[in-house]
Amino acid sequence: MQNQQDEQQQQPIFSQPPKVITTKDTLYLKDQLSWQLIAMKKCYHFARECSDSDISHAIDRAGQMHQRHYEMLLKHLQNDNTSEMKTVQKKLQQ
């Protein structure tokens, strides 16, 4: 019990979480990207199938929202994990 408390006290404190994407994070983001892409495709399809222009426009706007979410999630995957991990490792060694 005492060793666990000593280890917890010796771990560095990060003022901000590191900008590292773990494997689990990557898998979650990929799932989200897939769901956003499917929703975007469905909106595109149904907006073209709809005969009411107001409803078609509303569905098209929803599809554009899914596209924005897709692009936002994609930015999170464009991260230099190698350099960020070096920063984390240096912090852990201090």
Image (cartoon, rainbow, N blue to C red):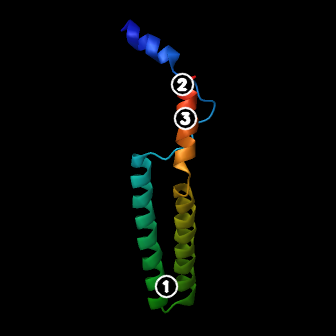
**Left or right of residue 14, residue 31 in this image:** left
Viewer-side residue, 24 vs 78: 78
Report the mark closest to the observer, 1 or 3: 3
Is 26 located above or below residue 91 in the figure? Answer: below
Asked whether residue 6 is in view, the answer is: yes
**Residue 8 locus on image (x, y percent):** 47, 17
**Left or right of residue 28, residue 55 in this image:** right
Measured Cα–Cα span from mark 2 to mark 3? 9 Å
Q: Quadrant of the N terminus?
A: top left
Measured Cα–Cα span from mark 2 to mark 1? 55 Å
- SS for dot 3: helix
Viewer-side residue, 13 vs 48: 13
Residue that mark 3 sits on: 88
Question: Which residue sits at x=43%, y=53%?
Answer: 26
- SS for dot 1: helix
Question: Which residue sits at x=57%, y=76%?
Answer: 61
Is 41 located above or below residue 48 in the figure? Answer: above
Q: Earlier in the sequence, mark 1 or mark 3?
A: 1
Q: Quadrant of the C terminus?
A: top right
Viewer-side residue, 15 vs 12: 12
Question: Which residue sits at x=54%, y=25%?
Answer: 93
